[in-house]
Amino acid sequence: MSISNPIVNLVVFVLLVALLFFLFRPVKGWVWIIRNSIKTNQKIITEDILKQMYTLETMGESIFKEELMNGLKYRNGVLEDVMDAMAVSGLIALEGKEMSLLPMGREYAIKIVRVHRLWEKYLAEKTGFDKTEWHPRAEKMEHQLSYEETNVLATKLGNPIYDPHGDPIPSHLGEVTDIDGKHLVDLEADTVGKIVHIEDEPAVIYHQILAENIHIGSHIRVVENNEKRVVFYSEGEEFILAPEVARNLTIEVFTEDVYIEEDAVRLSALKSGESAEILGISKECRGESRRRLLDLGFVKGASIHIGLESPLRNPKAYIVKGSAIALRDDQAAKVLIKRK
């Protein structure tokens, strides 16, 4: 007959207690962490579905279940389960191949859109992140704020109405301002107006627009519009876009009595030996960058000329109010001038 070793039994008992502690410890135990992780993932997936449905709804498009699932980054089986749960809870309606937002789901979606666009505004105004990073970072951060924290963020930003792309930011009551304008691709030649919205999806088209150095708030004049290309003139430069890219720009069309500064150009176009008068700073320049330029003397009415060029002509030293200020071409492109 074998006799149990008391020390071995004690060690086994201690290990068992420790294992149970790590598994079921409140809040920090593995079981709690896994359970909360599952709940968190379901919440994120639900919010991603609602936001995508709201986007399609505001564009006036029908919402097809299969297309929606293909556009999201989750497995179809997971999406099916979450959608069924959303239908049971009264957020969405499932009718065959089509889906629609119910009032409670639309209200929830607007809250998520509000958080996303406030975060983009924060990233644009308060951080140094490149504009290509605003949208993906906001997509991660939009799931983290409560209703009260969202209102605090809005107050900190001055309760803005639009995000950096020109999209309306819903109010805390869920009110959404309309974008007043027409797609660039729909405008006739000689139409004049102002860029009020740049769509940031799909990302491949948005990056093309950024590569062209097109700024929100810029005045434009359409030169040519046909099935092959859209040509417009803005701030001393000519831009040529494919129609599918031009569709992502929304223009506030000016009436005949609105004056456009036809000879306004970007500071980056100024050449050695030329002098100019500063007309202002583009809305594309935000936050600390804008305040820095203003503090350095880049204010309306100030005279400016090139004092020194680097061997590659980028950056250049501009003389403004008696001081030499070095700017790269992408920085100078955000300062509007009028040649003397």
Image (tube, rainbow, N blue to C red):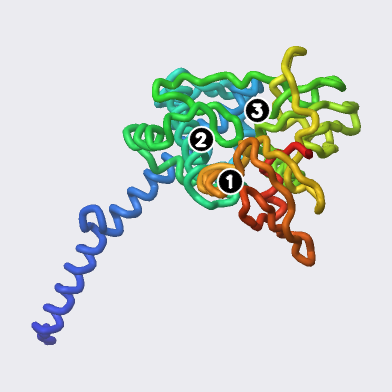
For marks 2 and 3, the one nearer the N-term is 2
Query: Which residue type does callout 3 highlight?
Result: Val
The residue carrying mark 1 is 297
Distance from label 2 to label 3 (Cα)? 16 Å
Numbered mark located on residue 140 in the image? none
Q: Position of residue 248 (x, y in %)?
A: 72, 32
Q: Is residue 189 left or right of residue 149?
A: right
Q: Nearer the viewer, residue 255 or 317?
A: 317
Nearer the observer: mark 2 or 1; the answer is: 1
- Residue at figure coordinates x 43%, y 45% from the top left: 41
* Residue 75 can be seen in this image: no
The residue carrying mark 3 is 196
Distance from label 2 to label 1 (Cα)? 32 Å
- Assess disc 3: are there few (<14), some (14-19) or many (≥20) residues with their C-alpha within 10 Å of its C-alpha: many
Q: Position of residue 177 (x, y in %)?
A: 53, 20
The residue carrying mark 2 is 117
Q: Nearer the viewer, residue 276 or 77?
A: 276
Q: Quadrant of the C terminus?
A: top right
Nearer the observer: mark 2 or 3; the answer is: 3
Query: Which residue type does callout 2 highlight?
Result: Arg
- Residue at figure coordinates x 64%, y 40% from the top left: 302
